[in-house]
Image (cartoon, grey):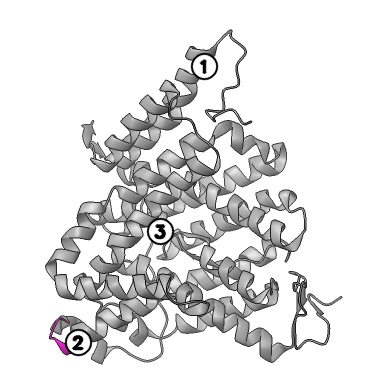
């Protein structure tokens, strides 16, 4: 039995048809589609380790390996690329002073927790997520994670304002004016443009350029062992909520377009992403998530074949074996990163707002309003409290508060009156 049957004649997709996950086009076209998926994920996947100080080639390696594992664990039913998750940027950047080993410990624990959530969903059903993490809670965690590092973005932007402004302008123009693949790789185009401008104006660091010249063309990625440190783990744990939301959203989006019921694969998807994230955290890579950029590519091409993702995963693994490539990415100056992150952090935060809007979360409800307000200010204001020699930052405090206080206060307010406690505005 073959993994993929050939769709039609293997050369074209007729109007109104989609290439299903278990189908493929001809191998030359499938390889081309796989490379296109690499282009779509590339800018975002590379940007995360660049910002957080992780080895770029190592992150690429585990991104590719994670994608291949995802296809195996989901039994070839859910097309997805596992790229670096933006949700890890804020906690990993906040923990940067602890060293890469401690950062990796946080990624490893996040992956293990995500596996646990996936196992629970497989055993108890996808409705478990709605009861434990309603939209008002999920949205709040995403907002505070996205906006926690806003001051760092503006600081990087201000260090090279002209380069930052050019980078941001190109990203906006490509994302809003262009169509198709160019809009999907707008971050990559903006970063490359900013780098070229920096190179022409003397904005690149000489030491990093020397390291680029000395780097080999071929070699193994740089591996690191994790270290479990409670203060860092508490920072990273809230990211699990974001990963759950992203994976569930991805599965539902694919199901809607392909016309298949994939609810039974939500648990497998969570387990697969958890395995990929834990594997990355065990050896030096950033945490992973299913990529919306690649959903866009599938929607544009109407090709949902997992074969294209197998090609993309293998391509990422091959790219990871070039140390010179990692050294090149390391030359990206602060101004370019500032231009990109000033937009990205805001976009992450607004994903949380979109979760609230899509689920009609009612902020006239005092429980929603008061709990979310306190949590978001603790997160964005980066409230730091030291307990027993361990410093816990705003992301952890805000997330822990909204996750624990919301159900308790909701129960206290509504006990005995029989009203629904989802936190949503009544429909109709």
Residue bearing the label numbered 2: 199
Instruction: Please report contact status of discs 1 and 2: CB closer than 8 Å, yes or no.
Output: no
Task: Give, as a single range, the part of the protein colored magenta.
Answer: 199-203
Tell which circle, 3 or 2, labels the residue nearer the N-terminal end: 3
The image quarter containing residue 342 is bottom left
Q: Main secondary structure of the magenta part?
A: loop
Q: Residue at x 81, y 80 (%)?
A: 7
- Asked whether the viewer can see residue 247, the reply is yes
User: 371 or 235, which is in the foreground?
Assistant: 371
The image quarter containing residue 220 is bottom left
Residue ranking furthest to the top: 416
User: 262 or 352, which is in the foreground?
Assistant: 352
In the displayed structure, does residue 240 sit left or right of residue 261? Answer: left
Label 2: which secondary element: helix
- Residue 192 falls within the magenta-colored stretch: no
Tell which circle, 1 or 2, labels the residue nearer the N-terminal end: 2
Residue bearing the label numbered 3: 86
């Amino acid at each position: 039995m073959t993994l993929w049957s050939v769709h039609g004649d293997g050369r074209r997709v007729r109007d109104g048809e989609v290439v299903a996950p278990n189908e493929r086009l001809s191998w030359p076209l499938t390889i081309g589609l796989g490379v296109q998926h690499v282009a779509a994920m590339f800018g975002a996947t590379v940007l995360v380790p660049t910002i957080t100080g992780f080895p770029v080639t190592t992150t690429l390696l585990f991104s590719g390996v994670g994608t291949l594992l995802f296809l195996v664990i989901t039994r070839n039913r859910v097309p997805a690329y596992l790229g670096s998750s933006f949700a890890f940027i804020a906690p990993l950047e906040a923990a940067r002073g602890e060293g890469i080993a401690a950062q990796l410990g946080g990624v490893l624990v996040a992956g293990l927790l995500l596996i646990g959530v996936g196992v629970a969903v497989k055993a108890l059903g996808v409705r478990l997520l709605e009861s434990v993490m309603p939209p008002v809670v999920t949205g709040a965690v995403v907002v505070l994670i996205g906006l926690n590092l806003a001051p760092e973005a503006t600081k990087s932007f201000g260090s090279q304002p002209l380069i930052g402004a050019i980078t941001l302008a190109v990203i906006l123009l490509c994302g809003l004016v262009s169509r198709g693949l160019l809009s999907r790789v707008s971050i990559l185009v903006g970063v490359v443009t900013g780098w070229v401008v920096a190179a022409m104006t003397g904005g690149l660091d000489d030491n990093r350029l020397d390291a680029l010249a000395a780097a080999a063309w071929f070699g193994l990625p740089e591996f690191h062992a994790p270290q479990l440190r409670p203060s860092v783990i508490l920072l990273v744990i809230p990211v699990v909520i974001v990963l759950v939301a992203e994976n569930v959203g991805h599965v539902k989006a694919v199901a809607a377009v392909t016309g298949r019921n994939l609810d039974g694969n939500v648990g497998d998807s969570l387990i697969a992403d958890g395995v990929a994230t834990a594997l990355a955290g065990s050896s030096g890579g950033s945490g992973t998530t299913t990529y919306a950029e690649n959903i866009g590519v599938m929607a544009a091409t109407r090709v949902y074949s997992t074969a294209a993702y197998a090609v993309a995963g293998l391509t990422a693994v091959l790219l990871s074996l070039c140390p010179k490539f990692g050294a090149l990415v390391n030359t990206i100056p602060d101004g370019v990163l500032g231009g990109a992150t000033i937009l990205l952090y805001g976009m992450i935060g607004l994903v949380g707002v979109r979760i609230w809007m899509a689920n009609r979360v009612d902020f006239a409800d005092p429980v929603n309003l008061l709990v979310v307000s306190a949590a978001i200010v603790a997160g964005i204001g980066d409230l730091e409290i030291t307990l027993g020699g361990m410093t816990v930052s705003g992301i952890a405090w805000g997330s822990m508060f909204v996750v624990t206080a919301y159900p308790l206060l909701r129960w206290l307010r509504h006990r005995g009156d029989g009203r629904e406690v989802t936190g949503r505005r009544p429909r109709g």
